[in-house]
């Protein structure tokens, strides 16, 4: 029966989406959603952003922040997904330093303020049949990176971004799942994070890293955006 099939499809679609609603420090997620993560417009729908020129690419923000987590350099910082990351594609992490004297809850990270600080990229040549081996973020519920020792102390916005490529065989088909958290970094160094990029601005809808091909299947993949700053 047709209605039955449609219901199953709807269920599958709903499960396929996710949001990053909790910060995770050293593997331990926050107790409640939207604590040190600014609530996103996807808080109910779990949708991604598909227009990389939209201001939603910055933080997809619905509400200002309410709390700031503490993390030391050398520790693991990341986000928990409301469901697992169940689309093929890379996960990247960006940070932006909150200026001295600014209110971290309301500071808008506009302009060239973000540097890439972590990435869970494709391993080797992507193959359609080995999603877990090729895309290490696939099926993960927690994605994280190590805060570089050279990162200066201070307050930062930390932005997670999961690029879902499963429908990216047409332009604008990539779905970007993202959120911004708020952290105070301690134990830091004297590094100068670079290069700095803006969201929107860092990506273009024509970037090869925002497209995918099943046939012929892509044999190499590089995520869009700047290289990772390792400190
Ligand atoms: C994408 O966002 C930009 C900036 O808001 C807007 O000018 C453009 O019309 C949008 N494109 C689409 C296809 O919605």
Image (spheres, rainbow, N blue to C red):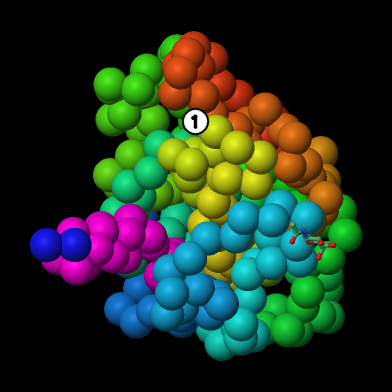
Q: Compared to 140, does 90 lie above or below?
A: above
- Residue assigned mark 1: 121
**Total marks in image:** 1
Q: Compared to 196, does 125 lie above or below?
A: above
Q: Which residues are magenta?
A: 3-22
Q: Is residue 169 visible?
A: yes
Which quadrant of the view contains residue 169?
top right
Residue at point 28%, 21% (across, down): 129
Please tell me whether residue 167 belongs to the stretch shown in magenta. no
Q: Nearer the viewer, residue 35 or 3?
A: 3
Q: Is residue 160 visible?
A: no
Q: Residue furthest front?
A: 1
Q: Nearer the viewer, residue 118 or 92?
A: 92
Question: Which quadrant of the rendered structure holds the N terminus?
Answer: bottom left
On whether ligand 1 comes within 8 Å of the CB at mark 1, the answer is no
Q: Compared to 219, does 154 lie above or below?
A: below
Q: Nearer the viewer, residue 49 or 153?
A: 49
Where's residue 192, x and y in %? Answer: 80, 43
Q: Compared to 105, does 25 lie above or below?
A: above
Which quadrant of the view contains residue 199?
bottom right
Residue at point 56%, 87% (across, down): 66
Element class at badge 1? loop
Where's residue 219, x and y in %? Answer: 49, 12
Task: Determine crowd level at label 1: few under 14, some 14-19, many 20+ residues with C-alpha closer than 10 A.
Answer: some
Q: Main secondary structure of the magenta part?
A: helix
Where's residue 191, x and y in %? Answer: 75, 42
Q: Residue furthest right?
A: 111
Residue at point 78%, 42% (across, down): 204
Left or right of 184: which side holds 12? left
Where's residue 208, x and y in %? Answer: 67, 27
Residue at point 72%, 33% (across, down): 207
């Amino acid at each position: 029966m047709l209605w039955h099939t449609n219901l199953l499809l709807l269920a599958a679609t709903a499960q396929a989406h996710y949001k990053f609603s909790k910060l995770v420090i050293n593997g331990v997620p926050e107790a409640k959603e939207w604590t040190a993560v600014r609530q996103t417009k996807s808080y109910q729908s779990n949708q991604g952003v598909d227009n990389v020129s939209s201001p939603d690419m910055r933080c997809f923000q619905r509400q200002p922040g309410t709390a700031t987590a503490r993390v030391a350099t050398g520790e693991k910082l990341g986000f928990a997904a409301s469901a697992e990351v169940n689309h093929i594609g890379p996960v990247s992490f960006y940070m932006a330093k909150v200026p001295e004297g600014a209110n971290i809850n309301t500071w808008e990270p506009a302009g060239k303020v973000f540097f890439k600080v972590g990435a869970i990229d494709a391993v080797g040549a992507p193959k359609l049949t080995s999603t877990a081996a090729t895309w290490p973020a696939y099926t993960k519920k927690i994605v994280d990176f190590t805060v570089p020792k050279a990162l200066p102390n201070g307050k930062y916005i930390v932005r997670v971004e999961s690029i879902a490529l499963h429908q990216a065989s047409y332009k604008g088909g990539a779905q970007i799942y993202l959120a911004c958290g708020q952290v105070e970094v301690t134990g830091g160094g004297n590094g100068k994070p670079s290069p700095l990029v803006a969201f929107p601005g860092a990506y273009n809808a024509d970037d090869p890293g925002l497209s995918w091909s099943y046939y012929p299947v892509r044999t190499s993949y590089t995520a869009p955006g700047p290289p990772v700053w390792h400190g």
